[in-house]
Image (spheres, grey):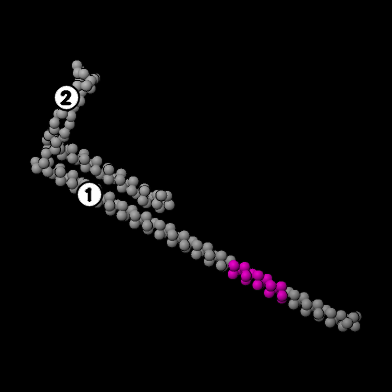
Amino acid sequence: MSAILIRFLPYIAALLIGAASAWMWQANSYEAIIATNEASHQADLTRIANAGAAQARQALEKQQAAEQALATLDQKAQKEKSDALAQNEKLRSDVASGARRLRIAGSCRASGGDLPGTASTTSLGNAGTVELSPAAGSTVLATRAGIIADQAALKALQAYVTNVCLLGNGVR
């Protein structure tokens, strides 16, 4: 039996050496594939991170532009409102002090059903002007101040929607 073993020993050694070589070659091949995949995966992660950072930068720039546009609009609207209210307040104080008088010009037209016994084409003519008392004039100007404030708020809201909301979303 030992003669048979000695006879096949070179073949067994060659077989073992070949198997070990094949195993080492395959292990190196798998390591190379894994290293390539890890490098590709890392490159993908880097690309994704860079794209996310670019999107975040763009979003921040859009937000800052919208905030700047809003601040500009707000400043302009506030100035227009305060100027109009200051003018109204000056008129109000002039009426209260008697430096100015508030008059309302008007005319009256009679129509067929409004006044009894008048024809539909009859006119009462120009009524001229009606002068209000300082208290009534102050009330009218206070009402005007409210209208000015409401119109300024509405104008500012329209400018905000047009210049900030719609432009921020790319709508023109």
How far across and down, in percent of the image, does residue 102 sit?
14, 38
Relative height, residue 50 to residue 163 (above, below): below
Q: Quadrant of the N terminus?
A: bottom right
Relative height, residue 112 to residue 163 (above, below): above
Q: Give amino acid for label 1.
A: Ser
* Residue at the image position 30 percent from the left and 52 percent from the top: 74
Q: Give amino acid for label 2.
A: Leu
Q: Which residue is mark 2?
A: 124
Q: In the shown orientation, is residue 115 left or right of residue 64? A: left
Question: SS class of the residue under badge 1?
Answer: helix
Question: Residue 36 magenta-drawn?
Answer: yes
Residue furthest front in the image: 121
**Numbered circles on residues, count:** 2
- Mark 1 touches mark 2? (CB < 8 Å): no
Magenta residues, as a range?
Answer: 24-40
How far across and down, in percent of the image, does residue 128 sit?
13, 31
Name which quarter of the figure residue 60 lies in: bottom left
* Residue at the image position 16 percent from the left and 24 percent from the top: 124
The mark closer to the camera, 1 or 2, is 2
Question: SS class of the residue under badge 2?
Answer: strand
Magenta stretch secondary structure, dominant: helix
C-alpha span from label 1 to label 2: 41 Å
Question: Which residue is at the front of the view, 155 or 33?
Answer: 155
Q: Residue 82, labelled with which disc?
A: 1
Q: Earlier in the sequence, mark 1 or mark 2?
A: 1
How far across and down, in percent of the image, does residue 123 sit?
18, 24
Q: Residue 150, labelled with which disc?
A: none
Q: In the shown orientation, is residue 13 left or right of residue 72? A: right
How far across and down, in percent of the image, does residue 159 sit?
33, 48
Name which quarter of the figure residue 36 lies in: bottom right
Question: Residue 121 magenta-drawn?
Answer: no
* Residue at the image position 50 percent from the left and 62 percent from the top: 51
